Image (tube, rainbow, N blue to C red):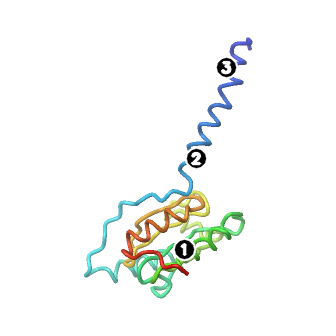
Amino acid sequence: MDWQAAIIVGLGLPALATAVGLVWRARTGRVRSTTTARATTTDAATTRSASAAALGLDDADLGAAATLVQFSTEYCSRCPSTARQLTAVADGYEGVRHVEIDLTHRADLADRFHVRQTPTTLILRADGTTTARIGGVPRPEAVRTHLETITRSPHVAS
């Protein structure tokens, strides 16, 4: 290899790796709205039951206003702190619950919900429809903003 090609490769690869890392960092933890159709009032109970069944949850596990569903695994180093963070956020709102689902032995759920990294968080409306998805450790202010939008209630100071 001649010296010009070596310089191009030597400078190009770190620049490419830096660009990919910056894009990855910018996307991780952001709330991304999903495009699920909102259930009508007549089939809200059916939708809620179907969503709960798909997640392996009872209707009693879901919040009256919204639910934060966190997918984690046994070996995820960031999942325990994420669970504490999401529980604290959920406790600040009336009718919002945090549910953690361990995917270590549930590959079917990982495939069904297209989970490629843990933690991954879904934000569900009261009727069980998914309104947002967060890959990686969620940003608390973004979660609060989204919850205020779907629950139409402000954060309650503890």
Q: Residue furthest front?
A: 157
Answer with the quarter of the image where residue 102 lies. bottom right
Q: Amino acid at mark 3?
A: Ile
Establish if 91 lies above or below 122: below
Q: CA distance from mark 2 to mark 1?
A: 25 Å
Residue shown at 65%/36% (left/top)?
17
Q: CA distance from mark 3 to mark 2?
A: 24 Å
Where does the image place residue 18, in percent across and percent down from the top left?
Answer: 64, 37
Q: Which one is in front, 107 or 26?
A: 26
Q: Amino acid at mark 1?
A: Val
Q: Which one is in front, 29 or 43?
A: 29
Residue shown at 55%/67% (left/top)?
108
* Relative side of 58 to 79, left or right: left
Query: Which residue is labeled 1 in the image?
Result: 89
Answer with the quarter of the image where residue 120 lies. bottom right
Question: Of callouts 3 and 2, which one flags the residue occurring earlier in the amino acid sequence?
Answer: 3
Where does the image place residue 123, in percent across and percent down from the top left?
Answer: 46, 69
Q: CA distance from mark 1 to mark 3?
A: 48 Å
Contact (Cβ within 8 Å) of mark 1 with mark 3 = no
| Mark 3 residue element | helix
If the image is split into quadrants, where does the C terminus sit? bottom right
Of the two numbered discs 1 and 3 in the rendering, the one whose residue sits closer to the viewer: 1
Contact (Cβ within 8 Å) of mark 2 with mark 1 = no
| Mark 2 residue element | helix
Where does the image place residue 46, in percent across and percent down from the top left?
Answer: 34, 81
Question: Of callouts 2 and 1, which one flags the residue occurring earlier in the amino acid sequence?
Answer: 2
Query: Which residue is labeled 3 in the image?
Result: 8
Establish if 64 lies above or below 155: below
Query: Which residue is labeled 2 in the image?
Result: 24
Residue shown at 56%/43% (left/top)?
23
